[in-house]
Amino acid sequence: MTVNVRDVLPRDAIPSVDNPAFGDAYDWSPDDEVIAVTFADPPRAYPVRFLQFHEIVNDAVGGATDASKKGSTDESGADPIAVTWCPLCGSGIVYDRTHAGRTLEFGVSGKLADDDLVMYDRETGSEWKQSTGECIAGAFEGDSLVVRPAALLSVREFRESFPDGVVLRPPGGESEAASPDDEPVPIDYDASPYEEYASGEGFGLAAHRGTNGRREWGRTDDLDPKTVVLGVEVDDDALGFPVPRVRAAGGVVRTTVGDRDVVVFATDEGEAHAYADPGYDFAVTDTGVTADGTTWGPATGVAADARRLERLPTRRLYAFAWRDDHGPDAFYRAD
């Protein structure tokens, strides 16, 4: 599909986090959302409150299993990942930083592709569209990054489900996202520069900045442009699961994407989570999701008897961004 790329800011005006530090404390609301990387040892949480000012965290974690990764560790034995967030697209995706035998470090290019973050790697200067992981310019053009399993959880859910987990500490510094213009200023993590955009009807950069050139949605069905979608891709097949449609189906959807049997749960927090379908007859009851004689946590895939579902690599993003990448028919429908 055609990608519209434009320059918006100077390179690194929004600073990536390249030396992340973690701890137990989080001084903001327990309802705040985090991107949770639960295959790390210990599990790690990256607050969206911080990511909206940084957009990329270059990290290296331990504890990956064969089921959770398809890349390779670096020379130190760590597992290099990039935790990425585009505030305009509501897209939270974790990528493997190991590509073509090299460990890449990503920064914010200052460009947008269809209103989505364009990352660049500091090794070759190649540019990558965040929502797809595809290299759109440079030495790796046409290549794609490997998606890793991750979940969008509240701080409360993360702490309850992973009591040994750690949280990214406030990175600090300056960011254009903290500024009323294009000049970076010191970050105030109490601020929420995209709060009005997230709750408004418009979408894309023009809607965020309140300028001309706003995009039209044009759909007449039940999807708004900023409906939260969980995208599952298997080989060349892609299917986006809008949270309202999963909820309308009873909160559980079982289907096939490519050759993979998938089960998707919608939560009361407005998110969706996808797992490899073990073949159980899941049902949503007053006590939670039940199947095979026990209760399961839809946000974690963990059963009361300690069994654990295999979380699939997914992309969490707004409906307009999924449509930009995959077209108008790549959405799950119950019929």
Image (cartoon, rainbow, N blue to C red):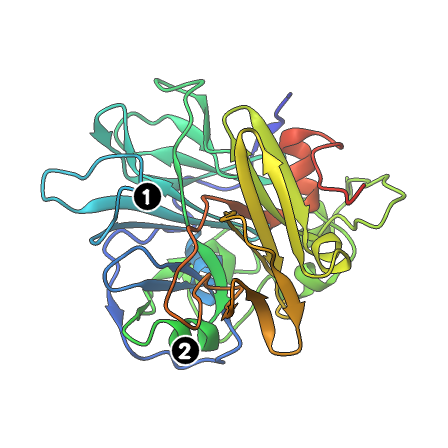
Disc 1 marks which amino acid? Answer: Ala
Residue at image point 28% right, 34% down: 71
Residue at image point 75% right, 32% down: 329
**Quarter in which the N terminus is drawn:** top right
Q: How crowded is the residue under tag 2: few (<14 C-alpha within 10 Å), some, or many (20+)? A: few
Disc on the earlier residue, 2 or 1: 1
Answer yes or no: is residue 203 visible.
Answer: yes
| Circle number at residue 160 | 2
CB within 8 Å, label 2 to label 1: no
310, above or below 302, in the image: above
Answer yes or no: is residue 184 visible.
Answer: no
State the residue lying farthest toward the front. Answer: 293
SS for tag 1? loop
Nearest to the eye among marks 2 and 1: give it: 1
SS for tag 2? helix
Residue 14 screen position, x and y as percent: 43, 50
Real-space Cα separation, disc 2 to disc 1, in angstroms: 24 Å
| Circle number at residue 324 | none
| Circle number at residue 67 | 1
Residue 149 screen position, x and y as percent: 41, 48
